[in-house]
Each structure stands twice: as C-alpha cells, then as structure tokens.
Image (spheres, helix red, strand yellow):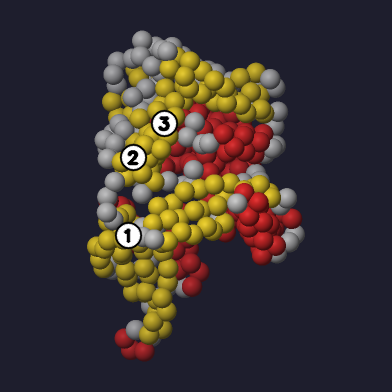
C-alpha cells in the first residue's frame, strides 16, 4: 500500500506540509502543480516553491506572495479582511480543481470553523476567520489537498505533533501556545511540547493533519520511494522542517473490514447522502444493494468497506446517518496490485494515469474525475478525452 508518513517533530504548519509533499513529486509534476496553483486566480497571489537550506540539509520553502510580499507565519495579516466560512467555501468551490480536492479543502475549513465556534461561543455560520481566513492560508490548504491528489491520494500516517511553547501574537492579542483553536483541533491527536519557544503547530497545520491522517504511529516497515523536506521560515537549534516519506508498506495483504446494515425506513435521498458521507470520510468503498425484506417490504443493504483500524469510526457514521439499530462486521483480507501514478498533458488538460501491476498482470487507466473535468471544460465527450490520453501514451512508447 502506498503511504505518506509525516514526521512532525518540529510541528505542523500549512506551508511546511505543502513543501514536504511537493518534494515527493517528480520534476514534471512539480511544474504542473505550480502552473495549476498560479492559474487558479486567487486574488493578487503568486505561489512558488524555492530551494531552502537549513542545518546543512537541502529542502523546499513554499511561499505565497500577496501583492508581491510574502506573508509571515504567526503575524496578523494586513492584506485581507476577515472571511466568513460561507465566503471561504464559496471561494474554494469556484476554483478550477478536481472534485476530491475541493471536498477535502472545504472539509479542512469546516473543521477549523467548528473549533473557532467553540472557542468564541458563536454559531459556526457567524464565525469570521483572521489568520486562517486570509488568501495565503487558502493557498496552503488548497495546495496540500492538490498535492495529496497528485500523489494518488495515498494513505497518510503521522507522528505525534510537537506544538512548541510560549506565546503567539494573533488578531485577538497575545495567546498561549498552542492557541485555543489549535488546542481543540489537536483533540484526539497525540501531541507534546519539547520546550522549543514558539508556535510550531498552527491551526491550519493541525486541521490538515487531523483531516488526512488516518493513524498516528511509528513509521511502518516499507520501501522508501521519496523523501521530502518542507522547511520552515525560522531557525532553531534543530532542523526546522516537516519531513515526508513516500513509501510502499510491506505486507502480503491489506486487512479490511466490511460493515453492513439493512434499511427499510429511509428515503433514497437519505441513503444517497449516507453513501456520499462514507466516501468523503475515507471509506475504501460504499454501495447500496436493493433487497426485499421481511413482510415483503422493499429495502436496502448498505455496504461500507474500510481499513480495519477505522472500524469504530465508520460504525459511528452508520449509526449517526442511518436509522439502523445494528451493524454487522466482517473482517477480510485483500490482495492488491501495486499502483503508480503519472500525469499526461493533452490539448484538453492534464489527466492523471493509474498504472497497476502485480500477479502477472499490468493495467493502465486514466482517472475518471480528470477525464470528466476535461470533457466538461472543453465541451467534448469523455471518449474524446480518453482517446487523446491514449494517443499521448502511445507517443511515449
């Protein structure tokens, strides 16, 4: 299984997380990422990934410049008014990005909004962001979500988060580290302070890690494919970076859990929302089977496939979003082909390619979401874009 391990010994900030994932891309995809981010049309914004050296180690610094000036982490933003959650979600939803990227970015901001709501005692709809509402923070969140997508949406595991110590100045004044909203975002995440003075974990960083990390643990055994160093702006006695490892986990098979429940008293709309919620929450698969139940009633069987360590999480979702009183659990193994991702540039746009191999077989398949996005944008059929992709692959030999 392809996995990204985030080493957070110097905390988690949006720019450092983006830079670490950026370094995992090959040269062509690095250029494609920067082209796409700078073509989004974020107001007066320019994104760059610059070489950076700290403690004798080379890495990358992810910069977001507004009106030609780079914003600094931990200082109040001067170029932007505060933003409502509705305004931010509207901005992200209008960006020319694949649907999974938009869904993840919106989910990250909704996570932040819930924390801010509890801190300030106001409804989520009335929350206005300051630091995390600025355009450069949107670029951090969207950038990380796009990078995760371009890497093939790998499983993410994180180490415990070093939060730092002392105080941080923000729009509300001088606050202790970790800041109140960050503290709430860190709930259910293992964290600690090594005593380093400063804000090492920001609200944006905590929200990104909390959304994407399915597990917090030591790095499982596997074969490294790439290592990325996302450098912070400040210098400390130790190397200030987020380190990301892209690797293939060892193991003969995946261990999965299949969750099932029968429903005969929910509307089709509610069932569709349930399946959509399961998939957006990271289920491997979720589907519906029509059945005839006792007393001749038409009904549905909901099937959710998830990683074994997420069994409790998805049971809770099934109970929360359905009328079921019980969930059946089946543990199963799965042999999976090795998967690699590539990007093909066509006249209709960029399309990710999934290459699968193993057990004596090889397959190449364009990603449907990318095909559909290009087809809609160009006003052509799905098959037309697919033929263009295959022609480009043929040219490569």
Residue 70: in sight, yes or no? yes
Looking at this view, is 48 or 14 the one in front? 48
Give the residue pinned by disc 2.
Answer: 223
Spatial distance from mark 2 to mark 3, Cα to Cα? Answer: 11 Å
Q: Please indicate whether residue 252 sits to the left or right of residue 35 in the image.
A: left
Disc sitting over residue 335 in the figure = 1
Looking at this view, is 281 or 256 the one in front? 256
Residue at 45% from the left image edge and 41% from the top image edge: 111
Work out whether 343 lies above or below 291. above
Q: Position of residue 208 (x, y in %)?
A: 44, 37
Residue at 49% from the left image edge and 59% from the top image edge: 363
Pointer 3: residues within 10 angstroms few (<14), some, or many (20+)? some
Which of pointers 3 and 1 lies earlier in the amino acid sequence?
3
Q: Quadrant of residue 34?
A: top right
Q: Nearer the viewer, mark 2 or mark 3?
A: 2
Dot 1: element:
loop
Residue located farthest toward the front when viewing the structure as drawn: 397
Residue at 71% from the left image edge and 52% from the top image edge: 348
Q: Position of residue 256 (x, y in %)?
A: 29, 58
Q: Position of residue 176 (x, y in %)?
A: 37, 19
Give the residue pinned by disc 3.
Answer: 227
Residue at 47% from the left image edge and 19% from the top image edge: 58
């Amino acid at each position: 299984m392809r996995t990204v391990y985030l080493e957070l010994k110097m905390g988690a900030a949006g720019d450092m997380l983006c830079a670490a994932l950026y370094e995992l891309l090959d040269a062509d995809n690095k250029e494609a990422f920067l082209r796409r981010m700078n073509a989004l049309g974020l107001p007066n914004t320019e994104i760059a990934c610059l070489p950076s050296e700290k403690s004798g180690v080379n890495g990358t610094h992810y910069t977001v410049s507004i009106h030609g000036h780079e914003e600094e982490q931990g200082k109040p933003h001067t170029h932007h008014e505060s933003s409502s959650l509705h305004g931010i979600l509207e901005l992200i939803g209008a960006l020319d990005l694949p649907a999974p990227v938009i869904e993840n970015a919106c989910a990250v901001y909704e996570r932040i909004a819930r924390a801010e709501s509890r801190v300030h005692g106001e409804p989520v709809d009335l929350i206005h962001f300051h630091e995390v509402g600025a355009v450069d923070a949107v670029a951090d969140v969207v950038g990380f979500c796009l990078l995760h997508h371009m890497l093939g949406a790998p499983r993410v595991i994180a180490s415990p988060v070093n939060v730092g110590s002392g105080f941080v100045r923000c729009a509300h004044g001088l606050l202790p580290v970790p800041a109140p909203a960050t503290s709430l975002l860190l709930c259910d995440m293992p964290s600690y302070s090594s005593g380093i003075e400063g804000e090492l974990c920001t609200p944006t960083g905590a929200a990104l890690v909390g959304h994407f990390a399915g597990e917090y643990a030591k790095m499982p055994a596997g074969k490294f494919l790439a290592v990325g160093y996302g450098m912070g702006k400040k210098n400390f006695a130790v190397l200030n970076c987020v380190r990301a490892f892209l690797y293939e986990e060892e193991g003969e098979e995946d261990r999965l859990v299949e969750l099932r429940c029968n429903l005969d008293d929910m509307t089709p709309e509610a069932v569709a929302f349930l399946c959509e919620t399961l998939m957006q929450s990271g289920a491997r698969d979720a589907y519906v089977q029509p059945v005839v139940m006792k007393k001749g009633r038409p009904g549905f069987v909901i099937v959710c496939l998830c990683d074994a360590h997420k069994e409790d999480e998805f049971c809770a979702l099934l109970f929360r979003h359905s009328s079921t009183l019980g969930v059946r659990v089946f543990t199963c193994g799965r042999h999976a082909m090795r998967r690699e991702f590539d990007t093909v540039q066509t006249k209709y746009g960029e399309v990710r390619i999934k290459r699968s191999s193993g057990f004596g077989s090889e397959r190449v398949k364009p990603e449907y979401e990318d095909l559909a996005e290009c087809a809609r944008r160009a006003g052509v059929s799905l098959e037309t874009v697919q033929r263009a992709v295959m022609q480009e692959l043929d040219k490569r030999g």
